[in-house]
Amino acid sequence: MTLTLLLDLDDTLLNTNLESFIPAYFQALARELAPQIAPEIMFRALISGTQKMNESEDFSHTLQDVFDAEFFPQINTPHDLLETAIENFYDNIFPGLSGLTSQKPEAKPFVEWAFSQGYRIAIATDPLLPRKATYHRLRWAGFEPEQFELVSTYDHFHFSKTHPAYYAEVLGRMGWPDGPVLMVGNDMERDIRPAQMLGLATYHVDDESASKSGPEAGARGKLSDLRLWLESADLSALIPSFKSRESVLAVLSAIPAAMNGLTCRIDLAAWAHKPTPDDWALIEVICHLRDTEREINQMQIKLFAEQSEPFIPRPDTSVWASQRNYLHENGLSALKEFNDARRETMDLLKECHD
């Protein structure tokens, strides 16, 4: 049984003290951009952009899209005019902030042990920073980004860690692993409670000795105790349960978010590629999801809302790919239509609940 580990970074794998690190980070960025932007204007725009990212529940826009749409109009400067200065900051200035952090001596031995067990590992750090910044911080912790199956950053994720949908998006990007999943982090409000709302087992990293309790309550203890805790744990008890209303809505949001992230950089030829003659191409999968959403899922929700014992017909959708000639549709257009259809479905569900 393969365990999937979702590991927080700051103050879990890396001693960071965000209350000191974030102000120093903002001040360093303000100094670098001072020739183009007054620091007080930039601070307001940074805070406002970060708040918008934390609030966003839009699975069709990355957190970078959300931040840029808030930040650049406020500073009244196009992104293109700042791109060189921003890249120089993350390449040459940001690494100098490493002195505000320190390695956790127990982190690297634990991760190496976890890899030796065949565990799948994602770095589930709050995706509020650019990829370069997150990769620098991983290296400060003693790791290389390429070691991990996934590292969440703001350019390809759609939710912050305040939302259960973030954790569902992580799993979606990893192909929805079948086995047990454990979220490990130090922050109750961003690491533990949202993961539990999705239905994941959690391990709260703090200074107390490790204690095992039920998956719903989670476990807590030092990072140095986590290996022994896992060695004695019943991994079957860590299999997620996606049954609550919050969990269902999070998964519904995360599916298009993960698909948007996975397909954003593929070329046009890849949309119609079939791994084998019997497989469906990506464009066929997207079109099938879109039409199923519109013609089946939404109809079923309406019937349940209107009738106490509805009869729900289920057509043979396996023939749609050939009948409807999905291979000749435009992939990006079909994906956008699926996003729109999923949004309509979620609106229907929320109306039914209200």
Image (tube, rainbow, N blue to C red):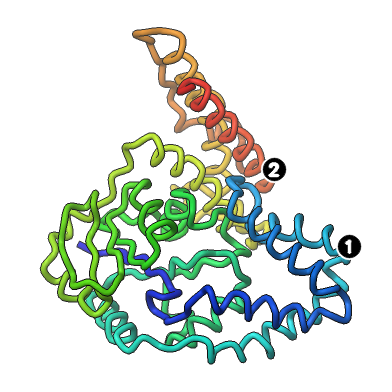
Q: Residues within 10 Å of mark 1 (few under 14, many from 20)?
A: few
Mark 1 or mark 2: whose residue is earlier in sequence: 1
Residue for badge 2: 333
Is disc 1 placed on a helix, strand or loop?
loop
Label 1 to label 2, Cα distance in Å? 32 Å
What is the quadrant of residue 111 in the picture? bottom left
Seen at 49% across and 86% down, the residue is: 101
Please tell me whether residue 208 is drawn above or below residue 277 in the rendered image. below
Say which quarter of the image contains residue 141: bottom left
**Mark 2 Cα-neighbour bin, 10 Å: few <14, some 14–19, many ≥20:** few
- In the picture, measured across the screen, residue 66 lies left or right of residue 216, that is right
Q: Residue at x 81, y 67 (%)?
A: 41
Q: Amino acid at mark 2?
A: Ser
Where 59 falls versus 269 (above or below)? above
| Disc number placed over residue 76 in the picture, else none | 1
Residue situated in front as seen by the camera: 51 or 326? 51
Observer-side mark, 1 or 2, equals: 1
State the SS at label 2: helix
